[in-house]
Image: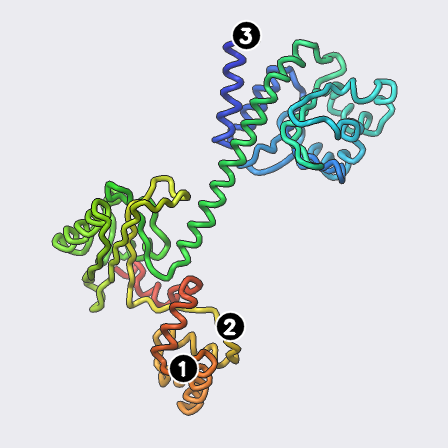
Amino acid sequence: MNQSQYDNLIGKIYDAAVMPELWPVFLEQLSDTFKSRGTALHLVDFASLSSTCRSDETSFIQTVRTDPETVVSYERYYSKVNVWLENSKYLPEGELITSDRLLPVQEFVKTEWYNDWLKPQGYFHAMIGHILKQDTLAVRLSIFRSKQQPFSADETALFARLVPHLRRSCMIHKKFADVKSILTTDAELLNRLPVGLVLLDKSGQAVFVNRMAENLTRCADGFYFNAAGRCLAGTADETRALRLLLDNAIELGQGNAMSLRRNKSNRPLSAIVVSLQNQTLPFIGSVPAVALFLCDPDLPLDLDDSLLTQCYGLSPAEAKLATALLRGQTPSDYAETRGISNNTVKTQLKQVLIKTGTHRQSELIQLLTTGFGMLANPTQAALTQSSPLDL
């Protein structure tokens, strides 16, 4: 292999670290380089002699040039009779070994491992390296060749040069996967907010829009985005006023609020602008400079009854009443809907107030909104009413 080919192979290693779908591409090129009949980057547990050779496209656990059914049979059974695996469990991280050093040939050819799994695929020799290792777990690279293709000293030396790069690439891959996991988790938390949230960068362009804000923008009534991701209101005057608030938050660190009038409702949206100066949110690709909260008074909240039962000891009937009040129903409307008397509802409400430590219905709603707002969702009926299909 000349220097240009070597550099190209190293490039493929690091490309795969940031674009996981390229791991099979790298392994195929590695197989070409070493004339491999099969190559696997797999996870091994030496405590149980089990192995994982297959994963999704986001993982570096990949196998190429090996029949999928053969891979399954290895995971289910043959890893446990793999004499190479047992004899290499003390191989340190970053080091490699060739299979002829793991077991004498005269013993190897008598094993179930060779006769029932390797031989049918034309495998005889292997070069093995532990890319990462922790306790009894190891990420292991195995390159298989035929009986007529033992590995030369030059090939072993080349493989040894590649192992440190592979190790770094796998570690980079893991870091990216961790960040992606955090991003997904934090985005889901923001999507649970019972209000719309838009994070904007210093240019006033949206870099994150939560689920509630997306629902509001689909209605295009009082608030939406232009093609560049900048905020628009229902009128030109309100758009200018909203952008002035955003600019002041970005440049001066000032927070403020305004109402955004709508055509389909007499009650406007509440727009609250909060500066995020010197506050980093690392799970967003572009650092946001301002947060815009959008509150829709026409979208009452819905709460799981069981949460109130667990937290305050409400009976199922009392919990249903409390969540109905949170959705905006009056006690009399609730009584009619449930087919019960107003006196029954009054008795239930009295118990709800006692158990929650509140004195009036308004205090109860405030308590539920403050205490459980993150876990509440807009009622399905309200979302249907504001659906863009109705426009």
C-alpha separation, residue under disc 2 versus residue under disc 1: 26 Å
Find residue 337 and report its horizontal and vertical position in percent: 40, 82
The quarter holding residue 30 reads top right
In the rendered view, tell whether residue 251 sits above or below residue 364. above
Which label sits in the foreground, 3 or 1? 3
Q: Is residue 362 left or right of residue 62?
A: left
Which label sits in the foreground, 3 or 2? 2
Which label sits in the foreground, 2 or 1? 2
Name the residue beneath numbered marker 1.
337
Name the residue beneath numbered marker 2.
311
Find residue 177 and report its horizontal and vertical position in percent: 51, 38
In the rendered view, tell whether residue 271 sits above or below residue 25. below
Name the residue beneath numbered marker 3.
2
Q: Please tell me which of labels 2 and 1 falls first in the chain.
A: 2
Which residue lies at the image location 14% right of the left edge and 51% below the top edge? 240
* SS at mark 3 in the image: loop
